């Protein structure tokens, strides 16, 4: 029922080359090549970058391939012959987490979900908010966990509050950083240095961009967007960049305090940011997604009590 070219796109994305994809699909390589070229002409952008070692998805191509794969899987589910005792929870539940450092929040709820509904299969991925919201809006994931303030900008998404007891954010730098020698650093002083932000969106991205804009500095030249904390620490440890950490983590880690120092006197990121689970407003969430959201909300209530 679907355009067969979508199968070819997904096959190349999975196999990493036109030749390998042709073997999977059962057609010639030239047929795959013509199919991909034809669909790229139709949509007006390249899905793959052709290299001697294979095919690499472009940024737009990655979104296209993910949506194509979801369409194919949804079509297969739709056409599957129903069984009298069919489990409504069976199948893959795709969850996106942004920032990825919040994945630990899923541990207990997912364990409970699998105990109650063992037929659920999980596909959990962490990324930046920008990436996760794209996946959610185009149907590549079923539900997303992230900061409520970031999802609030998208009216086509429905948000379900998850009231975790969250730490406030703090700024940190390496030991020996020039800022530590400044007696009373200001926001203008802070704007002299690069930032490592876990997201380009709210609640962090907009505030950090404003910091540079208020000083007449092009923020595009000063902000790294990195969510994987080991990389954040490495950048901060080896440069004069300023990083963001949850205040409680910084207080509890002796290893962190031996290498880094928290900057006092900057409270523009200090307000804890509420979390939510987001789904597409236009479609009713699947039973597994609804069960996951309920467990996330219940786990948050228990830990906040």
Image (cartoon, rainbow, N blue to C red):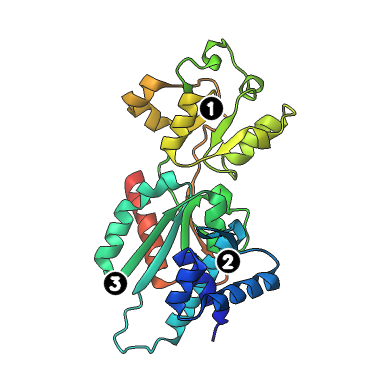
Where, quadrant-wise, is the N terminus in this rendering?
A: bottom right
Residue pushed farthest front? 52
Residue pushed farthest right? 216
Discs 3, 1 touching: Cβ within 8 Å: no
Where disc 3 sits, the SS reads loop
- Calculate the distance from the C-alpha at mark 2 to the C-alpha at mark 1: 35 Å
Mark on residue 242? 1
Residue 196 in percent (x, y) is at: 54, 34
Mark on residue 119? 3
Residue for point 59% across, 28% down: 194
Label 3 or label 1, whichever lies nearer to me, is 1
Q: Which mark is first along the chain, 1 or 3?
A: 3
**Does 70 appear above or below 107?**
below
Q: Which mark is first along the chain, 1 or 2?
A: 2
Q: Is residue 305 visible?
A: no
| Quadrant in the rendering for residue 234 | top left
Discs 2, 1 touching: Cβ within 8 Å: no
- Calculate the distance from the C-alpha at mark 3 to the C-alpha at mark 1: 45 Å
**Does 284 appear above or below 111?**
below
| Residue bearing mark 2 | 64
Residue for point 56% across, 79% down: 31
Task: Please give left or right for residue 292 compared with residue 19 in the image.
Answer: left
Residue 139 in percent (x, y) is at: 53, 67
Q: Is residue 91 visible?
A: yes
Residue for point 26% across, 67% down: 116
| Quadrant in the rendering for residue 2 | bottom right
Q: Say how many tags the image has.
A: 3
């Amino acid at each position: 029922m679907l355009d067969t070219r979508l199968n070819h796109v997904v096959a190349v994305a999975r196999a990493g080359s036109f030749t390998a994809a042709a073997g999977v699909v059962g057609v010639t390589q030239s047929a795959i090549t013509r199919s991909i070229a034809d669909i790229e002409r139709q949509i007006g952008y390249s899905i793959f970058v052709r290299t001697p070692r294979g095919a690499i998805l472009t940024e737009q191509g990655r979104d296209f391939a993910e949506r194509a794969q979801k369409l194919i899987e949804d079509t297969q589910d739709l056409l599957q012959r129903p069984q009298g005792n069919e489990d409504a929870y069976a199948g893959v539940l795709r969850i996106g987490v942004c920032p990825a450092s919040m994945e630990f929040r899923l541990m207990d709820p997912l364990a409970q979900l699998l105990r109650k509904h063992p037929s659920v299969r999980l596909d959990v991925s962490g990324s930046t908010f920008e990436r996760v919201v794209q996946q959610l809006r185009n149907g590549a994931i079923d539900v997303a966990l992230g900061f409520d303030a970031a999802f609030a900008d998208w009216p086509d998404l429905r948000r379900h509050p998850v009231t975790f007891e969250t730490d406030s954010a703090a700024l940190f730098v390496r030991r020996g950083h020039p800022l530590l020698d400044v007696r009373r650093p200001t926001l203008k002083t802070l704007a002299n240095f690069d930032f490592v932000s876990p997201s380009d969106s709210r609640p962090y991205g907009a505030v950090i961009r404003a910091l540079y804009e208020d000083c007449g500095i092009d923020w595009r030249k000063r902000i790294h967007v990195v969510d994987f904390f080991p990389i954040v620490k490495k950048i901060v440890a080896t440069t004069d960049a300023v990083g963001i950490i949850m205040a409680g983590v910084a207080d509890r880690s002796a290893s962190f305090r031996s290498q880094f120092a928290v900057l006092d006197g900057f409270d523009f990121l200090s307000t804890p940011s509420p979390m939510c689970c987001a789904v597409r407003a236009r479609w009713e969430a699947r039973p597994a997604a609804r069960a996951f959201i309920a467990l996330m909300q219940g786990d948050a209530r228990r830990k906040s009590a």
